[in-house]
Image: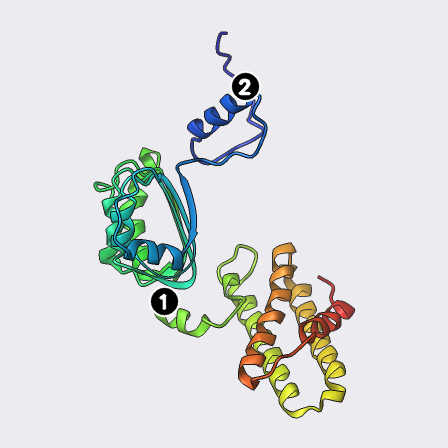
Amino acid sequence: MPTTLRAEPAQAYSIGWRLGDQLARQRRWDRDERGPWSDPHEMSTTGADLDRMTYDPGEPRHDVRHLRVTRVESLDCDRLAERFPELRTLCLSGDLGLLVHASGLNRLASLRHLWITDLFGMSASDALLPERVPALEFLCLRGIPREYAVAMRSRWRPQIAYGTYVDITAARTPEWVAENRGNPLRDWDGREQISRTCFRKAVAQYRKTRAALITALSDGSPEDRAARLYEIGREYGEGFNLLDRRTGFIETEEREELFAALDVMVSDAEAALGVRLESAADMLATGVNAVRDW
């Protein structure tokens, strides 16, 4: 069949080439195999499980080409590269966790795709080098040390002209990490529709509500707890009504994060007071829902 070149704009887009994956799925379809499928060369695990796996003696896993690691608290990249030397895709994410010996990723000569999200501990000397990972075509870093971000931009922006996709955002200072470690809204800092001023006011409102919650639970009697939690929830909802009225930044994701922040407040209060607070998050959410415009 002859190839037809189209002049009109495409109606869909994607980042990167997935020909191997698409071909494997098409061949399964042609064999009338319609059940769930997963790449036999792909592995997903947690940071804790991978740390144990790489610490224990074992042979290199040449069969694993795509590795996704979530909930990283501390991970040694030298040991990772030694255990999985043939990686083509590596996704690492944490909650302000640490990457140790991050320069060890330069040992992954076949690496094509790299994601690092909300992980720290890297310095400029840990930067990935184009001459060490020449096949890299996709680099996405978010929530990383500023020093590391500057070094990676310097190394990889020149590679954009040769086809490498480079996206490096949310570079953080050590002071930022220390200040925001317990802040469930920290991902708002630098988000496209949220200004720096709006972020600061949102964090201030969150911390005000958290403090009011702990005070209410410390001083109030159990009999009026439900009413006080309801009122605190209302004040939280009204505070964000005011912020959103000015800029209209609260969309679906932000709304979900604001409710998730209530759960964090309750967990912090339980830890501070040493008590179990049944239904506290529900009472707060009821108060929020009574007034929120977002």
- At x 71%, y 72%, the residue is 238
Alpha carbon separation for disc pair 2 and 1: 52 Å
Residue 143 percent across, percent down from the top left: 41, 58
Choose the circle earlier in sequence order: 2 or 1.
Answer: 2
Asked if 47 appears above or below 32 in the picture, the reply is below
What mark, if any, has residue 230 been given in the picture?
Answer: none
User: Quick check: 278 left or right of 43?
Assistant: right
Residue 182 in sight from this viewpoint: yes
- Dot 2 lies on which element? helix
- Nearest to the eye among marks 2 and 1: give it: 2
Q: Residues within 10 Å of mark 1 (few under 14, many from 20)?
A: some
Asked if 38 appears above or below 76 in the picture, the reply is above
What's the residue type where badge 1 is placed? Answer: Thr
- At x 33%, y 54%, the residue is 53
Residue 118 percent across, percent down from the top left: 42, 59
Occupied quadrant, residue 46: bottom left
- Dot 1 lies on which element? loop
Asked if 154 appears above or below 254 in the picture, the reply is above
Counting labels gives: 2
- At x 35%, y 69%, the residue is 174
Q: Residue furthest top?
A: 1
- At x 34%, y 61%, the residue is 146
Residue on which disc 1 sits: 173
Residue 143 in sight from this viewpoint: no
Which quadrant of the figure contains the C terminus? bottom right
Label 2 with label 1: CB-CB less than 8 Å: no
Q: Residues within 10 Å of mark 2 (few under 14, many from 20)?
A: few
What's the residue type where badge 2 is placed? Answer: Asp
What mark, if any, has residue 30 been given in the picture?
Answer: 2
Residue 63 percent across, percent down from the top left: 33, 37
